[in-house]
Each structure stands twice: as C-alpha cells, then as structure tokens.
Amino acid sequence: MCGICGIARYDGEPVSEQTLGEACKSLRHRGPDAAGVWVDQNAASTFGLGAVRLAVLDPSPAGHQPMARHGGRYHLAYNGEIYNYRELRRELEADGETFQTTGDTEVVLAACAKWGTDAFHRFNGMWALAFYDSHKRCGFLSRDRFGIKPLFYSNQGKRLTFASELGALRFLGKCGSVDAQTVVQHLQFGFIAHPRTIYDGVRRLPPGHFINFDSTTTSPPKRYYDAVSVAEKRPTISYSEACSAVRQRLLDAVVGRQVSDVPVGVFLSGGLDSSIIALHASQSTGQKIKSFSVGYAGHDSYNETAYARLVAEALSTEHHNLIFTERDVVEAVPQVLDHLSEPVGDSSIIPTSLVSQFAREHVVVALGGDGGDELFGGYWRYLGHRSREMYERLPTALRSLLIEPALNRLASSKSSRLGNKVRQFRKLLRGRSADVMSRHISWMRILSPEAEKIFQDAEVCHQLDDELSGIAGGYLRDRSSANLNDVMAFDLAYQLPADMLQKVDLASMMHSLEVRVPFLDHEVAEIAMGLPASYKVHSGLRKQILVDAYRGFLPDEVLDRPKMGFEVPFGELLRGPLREIFSDVVTRSAVDSFDMLDYDGISEVLADHLSRRGEHADLLFALLSLCWWGRK
C-alpha cells in the first residue's frame, strides 16, 4: 500500500524532483517505510513519478517505488494490492519474463508493459496506478473497478498532475477555485462524488476507468469495467445454489486478501458483514486471527461490542476491544479534520480513525466489510420503496390529519430507538415521487427540506437533485418500477466510492493501516448483482441471502439482530462538548466565504437540533468539516 503522485509536462519545462519530493512528504502517512522520485527529462516533454511505501509484500528495498523494468524503459507508481499476482507472475514467466522481487508491484509493472490497459481485466484487487513507457513517451493512469483506492488528477494548460490525495496535488500545480456545485453536493448528501472534487480544476478518476496520455495530450477517462453488464450475463441459479455460491466466493476472496508479509487482522463490529469476514478469515488460517472492535461508553445505541465479543468467542479470535469515551471523540475531531485535504461529510470517519489507530498497534493490514450493504440490500432505504407504497394505500385523511402531524411533534434523534424511527419515517415521507430513483435520491440526502434555509437560494439543491436523477437514470431499466437491483447498482457505482470507501481510505491511511475489502472482490460483486432482488430484500428483511447462507455458521443473535450504523453520537456531542468547537469554526465570516450560504439559516438549523425539534447531526458535521477545511 502506498501513496503516489506525478507530473506530465507538455511545455518543455523541467519537472522538479524537489517538488515531487514535497508532494511525497505530504503523503508520508500513507507510506512511512520508504519514499522515492524518478524524473525523465526531454526537450519536448517531461515526466516525473513519486511514491511513498507501506511495505506489505516483499518489504525489502527491491520492492521500493517508483519501480523500473527492462533497462529503465517502463516505470510504475502504484497504490494497492493485486491478490492474484502469483498466478499472473506464473503466466508472465511462462512467456519469458523474469522477476527480481517476490511482491506484486513488479508483476503489475510487467503486466502493464506486456498487456497495456488490457491488464486491468486480469487484476483481482484494488489499485490506483501510473504507468509510463519512456521510449514511446506515453502512459496511463488507472483506478480499480469499484474505487477502493483514490486517484485525483488535474489537466490544465500543458500539464497533467495526479496524486492519491488532494493535499499532494496542491504541491504539483494550481487546483483552481472552490467548486460551488461541489459545496452544494457536500452539504446535500454528505459526500463529494466523482468526477467532482472541492476544486473546479481537479477531478476524481471514476472507478473502473483509465486515462491515456502521451507527449502532447491527455485523453478523457475511458471505462474498462461495468459490473452491471458483466452480471447480466451470468446464468440464473436457484436460491440454494446462490447461498452456496456466495459463501464459497466470499471464502475465496478472504483467503486471497490474507496474502501478506506483515500481520493481518479483521475489523469486527458485530454486524453481519464483518462477522462473515471474520468467519472466513478464521476458517482459512491455522492461527488465531486478530479481531478489533470499538464501542462508545454510555450510549448503547452506538455500542456493538457485545455482539462483536459473541462472534469473537464463537470463532476463538484474539479479540481486542476498545471502549472510547466522550473525551476520546472530542479530541479526535480536530485531529481528523486537520488531516483532511477536502471536506468529508460523514461523521463516522471519527470512529473509523479511532479503530484504525487501535488496530495499527497490532497489525499492518485489516479486512473490512464495506460493500456488503450495497451488494446484498442492507440499507433501510431499500425496504423504503415497498414501505412507501404501502403507506400511500392508507386513507389520505389518516395520513395527513393524524400520522404526519404526530410525527412532526415527536422528537427526532439518532440516540434513541424511538427518535431514530421518527427520523427515518420523516425521511421516508420525503420520497413522494413516483420515479423510483428520484425517491431514492431524496432518501440519500442529509439535508432535509426544512434545512434548505442554510442556502441563500434553495434552488441550487433542486438543480443538483435533477442532475443526480439524470445520472441515476442510467442505471434504471424501468423508471416506474422499483427494481432494487438497479438502485443498488447506482449506490455501488456512485455513493459507495464517494462516501464509505473514501472515508475508510482516509481514516485508515492516516494511521498507515491498509484495509482490504473482500465483499468488493469483483467475482463476489458479479454474483450478487446477478441475483434477483428478492433473494436479498424479501418480506421486510434485508440481506436475506446472507442470513440464510450463514445460518449455522454464525450465532443466530448476529444473524437476526437489527442493523446498526458505525457511528459516534455526534448529534448528542453537539448539544454538549462539541458545541463550542462548532461555534468557533462555523462563524459568520467562515460561512460568508462560501458566498451561497446563509449564516442566519444555519443558526436556525442548529437551534432546531439543539432543542430536538429536528435531527440535523449529519448536516451539521458536514458544515463543520467544510468550514474547518475552508479556514486551512
């Protein structure tokens, strides 16, 4: 695992090794074990690569980057892991290639040199990479199928720059001004999705895409992988066959992701997805695996450690449990926000950072359960389409005169079971559109209609809704029918890399911890996406096929428990020790610097939250993150 950066200049000006070195220095948390730069100077064009290394496979100096082959013709800077590299190595050796290292980086370099961009179809893993042929003076950038690893780039004037993080990119050239539409997206949905970034001059390479460049030009991103089209070609299988196929492929995915020359552990929240990963990790090794969970003292709604301990005991893992306090969270907020080079609207980045820091004391690699919800129907909003249709069948008078007024009077809060149900039901009622994806997008929003007053002109919200509905429409085969597979495919391609995967990458690499995600093995994903939606969401139950596939393998208490989010009580902390921090950061001058925001409107939303008239914790964290970033 590493951090990468680079420059391609088309104006004849030299690439500065010192500049690349400064960019690498800003990425050192991603790769504390080694750093290097390489520059190819030419009268017509120049190219340079930089990389920092977290040594996981072949930790010897021979594995350092940037790496070269064939007498210095081919060069690679690469962030990720290819789990089938040994099979690819044997194939390349059979074709006459020889290798000097035992890790995957040299295999990736040889594969790119031999097969070009076709190599991506052969990779099973996660990656962001830059490949360069110094003889032909051309190369390409690439990002893995699902966007597990990030890659930012800027193509302005006669210069292409790229990096694993925005902070490094700022050393390599101008990023432009703040993108106003991105600010809206951040506050409306809590994430910034590809291709946008917070800067109008920088783009995020979409998952499953690559960019070609040569000595004069840079091509637009081109897609090499589409999970939907691949999944549609899979033959139909029975439910029992599907249970077996999912279980076997997940086992294979976990086995592959345990390949390492450094210690590997498992994040174990006590939820279904992480318990499945822990199960297969235990099955595939003769040693006790290390498992890690965290909980929050004093708030049962945010503490899953009892379930994690139950699974750990059932699997006989070497379990490490951390209970953090209110003080731990309050102290972590500035540390995490200081680390970010772009606003992040998901407050669960705080506990993710804490558990990553905790795990890094014992292991260098951890397996996580991300992707399971999007592939197997784990979110409440997947049930919401059916629930909304059932609600609409109730008499209009009952809904408008009794149910909805009662909901508006009840306190909304994530910190209590009743308050959270009220919050979710209010959100459910937003989705009045007959259009399936428009309804779904309304449920994705962290910005409620009554909170749109934070903008000087609320119309900007609806413009983004229309834009996002247009993007989402590309995943729907029938806009009038609630085909949940289409909805899940959209979440997998759009929200997952923008929110969950981005958050995990930032929070884990902040502490030099590599996180691998077996659910996003592309064969697991293709099996899941090829299954009927009824296998996943059925009779009011989510992840039905996972529950049935692992019945008898995991404790029933875990299989039958309600889903909990991995969060801290940020909303409650805003009513207490974080209120002063929020007020110090989200000031009138900070808000006014973004032009479109209304400070008085923000104050009203904050007052509603503090008095429990509304639950706006997610939005208020996004505002805190935005203003914190803005003052840096």
Image (spheres, helix red, strand yellow):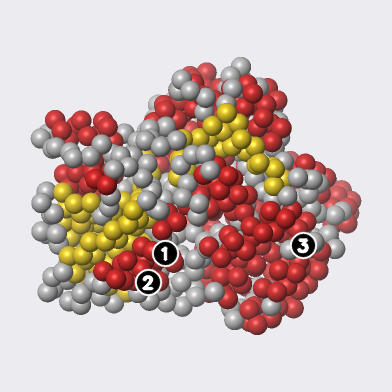
Give percent across and percent down for residue 230: 37, 38
Between 160 and 306, the residue placed more toward the observer is 306
Q: Secondary structure at mark 3?
A: loop
Which residue does the image show at 20% across and 77% down from the upper left? 13
Q: Which residue is mark 2?
A: 171
Q: Quadrant of residue 453?
A: bottom right
Badge number at residue 238:
none
Q: Is residue 220 above or below residue 286?
A: below
Q: Secondary structure at mark 2?
A: helix
Q: Amino acid at mark 2?
A: Phe
Task: Decide if residue 406 is on the left or right side of residue 8.
Answer: right
The answer to whether residue 348 is seen in the rendering is yes
Determine crowd level at label 1: few under 14, some 14-19, many 20+ residues with C-alpha closer than 10 A: some
Give percent across and percent down for residue 339: 53, 62
Task: Decide if residue 409 is on the left or right side of residue 500.
Answer: right
Q: Secondary structure at mark 1?
A: helix
N-terminal of the two: label 3 or label 2? 2
Q: Amino acid at mark 3?
A: Pro
Give percent across and percent down for residue 59: 32, 42
Q: Which residue is mark 1?
A: 26
